[in-house]
Image (spheres, rainbow, N blue to C red):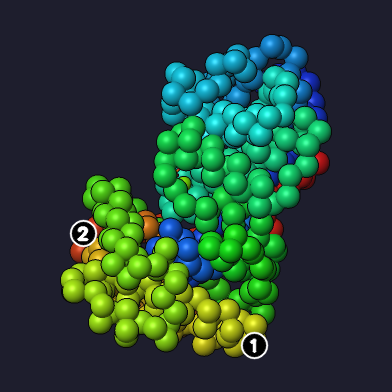
Amino acid sequence: MSAGSAAELFRRTFGRDPDGIFSAPGRVNLIGEHTDYNGGLVLPFAIDARAQLAAGRGDSSKVRIVSAQKPGEVVTVAPADIEPGAPAAAGWPGYLLGSFWAVRQTGRPLEPLDLVLDSQVPSGAGLSSSAAVECATVLAVSALAGYRFDPLTVARLAQRAENDFVGVPCGPMDQTASAAAADGAVLLFDTRAGTVENIPFDPAAHGLAILVIDTRVAHSLADGEYGRRRASCERAADVLGIRQLRDVPFSGLPAALDRLPDPELRRRVRHVVTENERVARTVALLRAGRIVEIGDLLTASHASLRDDYDVSCPELDLAVDTALAAGALGARMTGGGFGGSVIALVPAGRIDTVGAAVTAAFADHGWTAPVLRSVTPAQGARRDA
Ligand code: ADP
Ligand code: MG
């Protein structure tokens, strides 16, 4: 990223220097899918693509926002009008205004601000551009007002912006990764305990790379099916008399399955419980420096999401199968499913081969070319200047 791009646009737009520059990264989930709303474990990492925000205390009575990715628009809102459901909340400005609102909801008075966003996180590619924008904004708004939140608080406020202001019912993973991940690490996030731990993760040191394959498809059933999966998990927890599926330990899976009459519900539970176990095993391997061996766990995660959780789709399956056939050590869909991206663990020297194989396979099917990105674990939200 060009270091000063947001600051430069700030100067051009408002004719003065910003008071601070903040940034927050996108994220990709290494493993632990559809576990976060079950109180389970997730293992995302922040990526080396960031949303950068130049911020200045307002010289008007309004909050003004600009995005380099939305050229020509200067959104101007009176602070009193920054409320969920207000006209200003609609569309992309809602992600920034919602973050302003979420900080104000903590009872802290906020002054008008000028905010200029320039993000390298592609939007809608499964890399959580929204969390990057929210975390950078929460950090900027609070810092300029003289408050300092710890990373988990930044994440919680950013999630509140997305849930209660933008109106997207996302879980806590994206914002937590963007706010709390460390450079060269994956973030073990125990969603039940609300605790995080950074585990060193340096694929390059092992001659490996992480390839993200954006299938460019977003199947329309995603939203409804997501809600149905959540409801199934809640129903299963009810039948089992537990709070969340997290309460089924891996060793207790056979007994839990015996108590579930519905075959579909059994498969859903089997995914969630085995996925938590795969996260734990991945962490154990990473702690032991055995990164090469996590590939099988990634691939097993995909099979479970495909066969037990029914959230894959032909494009995701083809990307996974082709990547594996071309030399990836492991590959899986990442994100909610029904489109979005695949993450593959690949020997660094085979990145191009794997990418070319997937591109060719998509072309054979007459599908839109996938977008390939090599990502490395990077630092979470921070003040840059
Ligand atoms: P993602 O998976 O990328 O998070 P979302 O739909 O959750 O996808 O969030 C994408 C939305 O976030 C965009 O449609 C836009 O409203 C907002 N957004 C992300 N990046 C920018 C940006 N650079 N400028 C303006 N809005 C942005
Ligand atoms: Mg998002």
Residue 354 vs 222, above or below: the answer is below
> Which one is nearer the viewer's eye here, 252 or 380?
252
> In which quadrant will I find the C terminus?
top right
Tell me the kind of residue under disc 2: Gly
Residue denoted by label 2: 366
Can residue 343 be seen here? no
Residue 146 percent across, percent down from the top left? 81, 33
Asked if disc 1 is less than 8 Å from ligand 1, the answer is no
Q: Is residue 129 left or right of residue 64?
A: left
Q: Residue at (51%, 68%) from the top-left corner?
A: 41
Residue 37, given in percent of the width and then of the height, sits at 43, 58
Establish if 126 lies above or below 200.
Answer: above
Image point 72% across, 29% down: which residue? 108
Asked if disc 2 is less than 8 Å from ligand 1, the answer is no
* Label 1 neighbour load within 10 Å: few <14, some 14-19, many 20+: few
Looking at the rendered structure, the secondary structure element under dot 2 is loop
The amino acid pointed to by label 1 is Ala
Q: Position of residue 39 (x, y in %)?
A: 48, 63
Tell me where residue 144 appears, x and y as whole percent: 77, 31
Q: Secondary structure at mark 1?
A: loop
Taking depth in this image into account, of 253 and 81 the one nearest to the observer is: 253
Q: Residue furthest top?
A: 61
Would you say 10 lies left or right of 265 here? right
Tell me the residue at 44%/72% (across/down): 247
**Distance of label 1 from label 2 (alpha carbons):** 43 Å
Count of labels shown?
Answer: 2
Q: Which residue is mark 1?
A: 288
Determine which quarter of the picture holds residue 307: bottom left
Closer to us: 207 or 96: 96
User: Which residue ends up furthest to the left in the rendered image?
Assistant: 262
- Which numbered disc flags the more N-terminal residue, 1 or 2? 1
